[in-house]
Image: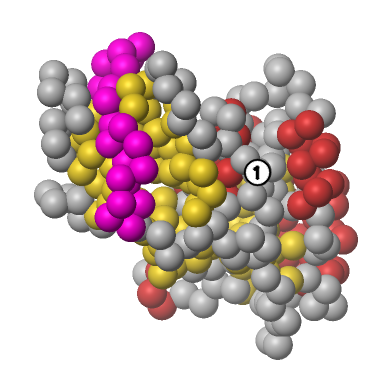
Amino acid sequence: MGSRCKVVSDVSHFLVTSSRREKAVKLALSAFNELRERGYNVILDSNLDGGKEEFDESNQQIDAILVFGGDGTILKTLKRWINIPILGINCGRVGFLTEIEPDELIKAIEKFERNEFFYEKYTTLSIESVEYPNPIAVNDIVVISDKTGRIITLKVSINNKQLYTFNGDGIIIASTTGSSAYSRSAGGPLIMPTVDAFSIVAICPFLGRVYPLVVPPETEIKVINASKYRDGNVVIDGEIYCKLKYEESITVTKSEKKVNFVRFSDNYVERVREKLLKLDPDDINEE
């Protein structure tokens, strides 16, 4: 759920990371030097220092992470540093989750110094299954056929009450953060940061009226593979997590963990207008 948190203590310990693109790496190293010159305690991610500064994460104080890249890089960073606020610097193309462009970095640092920022907090998803550990998803949990281009039959229930059974390409359960990603492309709704909710979106349902649905975070969503002759793939934030065989199921609920983005203004509507509504089809690759 998006919310403002008044910062009491100064942010003085940073971690700097980036995508592997040359431009992003150069900008990240430049920011590292700038922060060091200003007297901040700064650590480079092992991706940037070539693994020279391996450190024990549990013994490091990190107040915020500067991520130079696109939404994909931010998601990768969140998997490792789920509880630490992230400031995204857009070195990709769309960068919907990012907050600033590279030329705005100095102003951003100065705003840190004046405490002119807040944390936008988002709920994450938790997945439960019989045979596998329970990871979290920042964006979405997707169930699709393990055979590309083949439909799968899925049975979906909410709080132990059957919602529908349908044939289609799969289903997306998205967090507020993920509502702007795959879910949106499949016809799902955008969910504003101040709304703590999940969306359920069927992917290309065949011969059935299956509508996108927004549910409160306390909802328990169960998905069963009802295809006798086809396995499913469970995909978490774009990565295959496990197989879902006939009559096997996953249960999706609210996770206790949240992701935090550093924001300098309430700019969600601007980001939607500038980065989604005016999106050029050529600007779809995001790292």
Residue 277 position, x and y percent, is 78, 31
| Vertical relation: 48 (above or below) 149 | below
User: Across the whole image, how many numbered discs are drawn on residues?
Assistant: 1
Residue 198 position, x and y percent, is 50, 52
Is residue 48 a member of the stretch shown in magenta? Answer: no
Task: State the image quarter where residue 66 is shown.
Answer: bottom right
Nearer-the-camera pick, 102 or 232: 232
Nearer-the-camera pick, 225 or 286: 225
Question: Where's the N terminus, which quadrant?
Answer: bottom right
At 40% from the left and 33% from the top, the residue drawn is 171
Residue type, numbered disc 1: Leu
Residue 183 position, x and y percent, is 54, 36
Nearer-the-camera pick, 74 or 59: 74
Q: Would residue 148 appear left or right of 214 to someone viewing this image?
A: left
Q: Would residue 217 appear left or right of 248 to someone viewing this image?
A: right
| Vertical relation: 66 (above or below) 83 | above
Question: Where's the C terminus, which quadrant?
Answer: top right
Work out which residue is located at the far bottom of the displayed protein and give it. 8
Nearer-the-camera pick, 136 or 21: 136
Q: Main secondary structure of the magenta part?
A: strand
Task: State the image quarter where residue 40 is shown.
Answer: bottom right
Q: Which color scheme does this rendered protein use?
A: secondary structure
At 33% from the left and 22% from the top, the residue drawn is 167
- Region in magenta: 146-165
Work out which residue is located at the far top of the displayed protein and give it. 149
- SS category of the residue bearing label 1: loop
Label 1: few (<14), some or many (≥20) within 10 Å?
Answer: some
**In the rendered image, which residue does mark 1 sit on?**
190
Residue 257 visible in this rendered orientation of the protein: yes
